[in-house]
Amino acid sequence: MSKKEYIVIGLGQFGTSIAKTLMQNDCEVLALDINEEKTRALADTVTCAVTGDVKDPELVTGLGIRNFDGAVIAIGENMEASIVATMIVNELGVPHILAKAQSELHAKILRKVGADRVVLPENEVGIRYGNNLVHGNFFDAVELSPDISVMEINMRREWEGKSLKQLNMRARYKITVIGIKSEDGFEVNPDADEPLLPNSQLVAIGRNEVLNRLAEGR
Ligand code: ATP
């Protein structure tokens, strides 16, 4: 099987760490940055490092990325460049476009111009460590597809003492609880009639937007 090929545009901390991770996972990586210092720093690590402005359409179309497996747009501050980059790779037909945003508005625009997944890394890390500080054992979500994840959700006061059946989680939140973590350990496939205990966490599968909302306590 041939190696998967990705383009990473923008080699700040986020883009660089994704490019390195993809290489460690035996993928081919074409890295692009306007700043020659950045491309030179990664030249020996990635398959190919190119210096140039992503806003130059001839440069990007000339890279031959049409048949690539995915693209990462890791430009934060230069919003115009990040939008143009997302639009161009989308127009070229590259699937699986992951783009980094700096604000909710930026994220919304990136989705509109073709990003399949938008991340606000600082927000996500803040939420994770905030939860970690309070609950200690908060684990990262496991992403099963761009829309669906398995995530840990902290018990809410109003859920305590009620059973999963009573709470009607599936119909109400469109999530399925596959496990419950408590001081007693981890219960897989929990009994839907058992009352939920305080200080426990539900492990649920569902759509990211719903899980994120519940994980954030909203
Ligand atoms: P990080 O937090 O990941 O370090 P950041 O969110 O601060 O990065 P920037 O530093 O604004 O994002 O941009 C990331 C990279 O994108 C930089 O290395 C920058 O040189 C590159 N970049 C910015 N504009 C362009 C462009 N028009 N074409 C190609 N690369 C660009």
Image: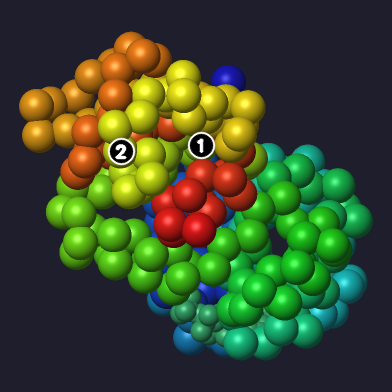
Q: Is residue 165 visible?
A: yes
Residue 175's place in the image compared with 61, above or below, is above
Reply above or below: 57 against 91: below
Residue in the foreground of this view, choosing between 98 and 1: 98
Name the image quarter holding the N terminus.
top right
The label nearer to you, 1 versus 2, is: 2
Element assignment for label 2: loop
Quadrant observed for ligand 1 in the rendered image: bottom right
Residue 8's x, y, as percent? Answer: 60, 61
For disc 1, the marked residue is 149
Residue type, numbered disc 2 = Glu
Position in image of residue 69 (x %, y %): 68, 40
Q: Disc 1 or 2, which lies upstream in sequence?
A: 1
Residue 10, disc: none
Horizontal side of 154 relative to 136 (left or right) equals right
Q: Residue furthest left?
A: 184
Pick the front one: 54 or 105: 105
* Residue under the image location 72 percent in, 77 percent down: 105
> Which residue is depicted at the point 61% across and 49% down?
209
Counting from the top left corner in percent of width and height, residue 206 is at 56, 33
- Residue 5 visible to an observer of this rendering: no
- Within-10-Å neighbours for mark 1: few <14, some 14–19, many 20+: some
- Label 1 vs label 2: CA separation? 24 Å
Q: Quadrant of residue 108?
A: bottom right
Query: Which percent across, then down, holds residue 59?
Result: 81, 72
Residue bearing the label numbered 2: 160
Q: Nearer the viewer, residue 95 or 193?
A: 193
Q: Is residue 144 above or below residue 89?
A: above
Identity, as a three-letter code, of the amino acid under mark 1: Ser
Residue at the image point whose x is 90% and y is 56% from the top: 91
